[in-house]
Amino acid sequence: MAESRTLDRRWLETAWSGFLWGLMIVFVINIGLMIGAVATSSFAKRWLGTWLPEGWTTTWYTSAWKEFQLDSVLWVTVEVVFAVVFLALLIGVPAAYALARRNFPGKRALVLLFLLPLMVPPITYGIPLATVLYQLHFAGHLTGVILANLIPAAPFVILVMTPFIEQIDPNLESAARVFGASTARMFWHVLVPLLAPGILAASLLVLVRTIAMFELTFLTAGPDSQTLVVALYYAVFAAGVRAPQSVDAMAMIYMVVTLTWLLIALRFVNPTQLVSRVKEHPRAA
Amino acid sequence: MTAVAAPLARAQFDRTLLLVLPGAAFMVLLFVYPFLYGLALSFNPPKGDAFENYRHFFTTDNLWPTIWTTLRLALPVTIINVFIALPIAFKMRVKSPYQRAITTVLVIPITLGTVLIAEGMLTYFGPKGWLSQFLQFFHLYGGPIHLTHNFTGVLLSLVVSGFPFAFLLILSYITGIDPALARAAATLGAPPAAQFRHIYLPLLAPGLAMCFCLAFVQAFSVFPSAVLLGSPAGPTRVISIAAYEAAFEQYDYSLASAIAMIMGFVQLIIVAAVLTLRNLFYRGPVVGGKG
């Protein structure tokens, strides 16, 4: 009796485990095929309702490159992404340092202020922000796009860096002080080298997230300040007059850009870090 | 000596605190100020009294139903994502070569972004895509499949982009729970199911609530896939489309701000509801202690 119950249970566990694996495999296969379909289409001469296209060509890439002015779009993307990463680090790392090392009145409120932009959808604050930026004549240019993208980026750097700084022994700083280092020297010669892995991780995470950030860029970009993801949106949105392969070729270029950076990022960071920005900050809620 | 030094040190201004100023100033200027500006603007319509925008929203036939459209999409998606991700993350909690491989593969849809997923789905799930051909080839389903340009398409795209997010987030919470607790239960004869029910689930409650909120935020702000994969005039006319149209097609920033505020408010209600629900569960430390 007891034996058959254990057997039953074991069977159930195997079935359940098989079901979960099945689910995962279906999901991953479909994602793979989805990407594969775009890739196939981007190299297809003509592809209408068959398994594989009738012929292969690379002309869509050259035509997409010209049609969507991808050289300027890519350049804008590079400018925006690197400006955002640099400024986010500049704002975020010192703030994270202060938050990690000091207790002061109003600290909880400040942490909440930095958490909030990550907790509300970008569109909610993006629309009032775009309105303000348009009035100040920042929107429609690179400045506006960079400023808008900094809002989730800077808090993200703070949230990634604060636990990282907390685990660095404050005695090292005291030692530098004892030997008479000024704050700037201490920062540059002691903290920055120790923080380098954390800074690298934070900047790669911000980089990957900024490349994929659609809403804020979309709301603030003008015709000559579109990043790759927004240009891709307009290409898909205004499709119909264009061959779908041309849009797919552009999608492939976008994918290659993001995947390259993603693979670089994954060498240095744990995949869960890409999403779990609140892990080290269990809120008292 | 120290008794004298301590108050002196406290009286002196701590210059380290200055480091937080640029960040705080930045957030106030670019996050708090625009938000308050938008709030004020929403009560200041071009014509009519202060509540004109809100009255307009709740009496216009293509505006107020967008709340339900969005909720009808976002709530099921969030529930699907969180409750499929939970058992899978539980299964993956043990460090293994699989764990690293699976998490890496699952990161890809997150970073590809919603626009690319929408484009991929149009190609793959479309009436002439591979999936449709596959089903017809094996005579699993006769007619053309309708998975794009409708409600299902948007739902699927939100699962594709939202599931990995929920999975990674829950995984990071689960791996944060001390495995010694589960091992203790196992020595007392608890099978995995019982370990999950009595140890992991109560400890995960805060993480699950947070995950639900964040996954919901993502699904609630659906914009690109609702336009590209759905039918933005009909069943997937979500609230962000309404806000965007008001701002950048009618140039009525006042109404657009009002819609953005309503959006924030609805979302706040859901988040508050989830956190209230979460409070009904266990509260306490997630690491093993000594009694």
Image (spheres, coloured by chain):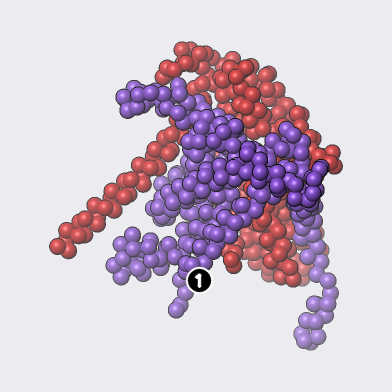
Q: Residues within 10 Å of mark 1 (few under 14, many from 20)?
A: few
Q: Quadrant of the C terminus of chain B?
A: bottom left
Provide residue B170's location: percent of width, then percent of height. Answer: 49, 54
Q: Quadrant of residue B243?
A: top right
Residue with the mark numbered 1: B284
- Could you say which is closer to the camera, residue B217 or residue A163? B217
Q: Is A223 located above or below residue A138 in the figure? A: above
Q: Quadrant of the N terminus of chain B?
A: bottom right
Provide residue B242's location: percent of width, then percent of height. Answer: 66, 39
Q: Is residue A5 left or right of residue B48?
A: left
Q: Is B1 located above or below residue B228 in the figure? A: below
Q: Residue at x 38, y 23 (%)?
A: B143
Q: Quadrant of residue A226?
A: top right
- Could you say which is closer to the camera, residue A243 or residue A40? A243
Q: Is residue B134 left or right of residue B272?
A: left
Q: Secondary structure at mark 1?
A: loop
Letter of the chain that mark 1 sits on in the rendering? B
Q: Residue at x 84, y 38 (%)?
A: A137
Provide residue A173's location: percent of width, then percent of height. Answer: 72, 66
Chain A rendering hue? red
The purple-coloured chain is labelled B
Identity, as a three-letter code, of the amino acid under mark 1: Gly
Q: Residue at x 56, y 24 (%)?
A: A248
Is residue A72 visible in the rendered structure shown here?
yes
Q: Residue at x 61, y 22 (%)?
A: A239
Q: Quadrant of residue A261?
A: top right
Provide residue A94's location: percent of width, then percent of height. Answer: 74, 58
Q: Is residue A142 left or right of residue A269?
A: right
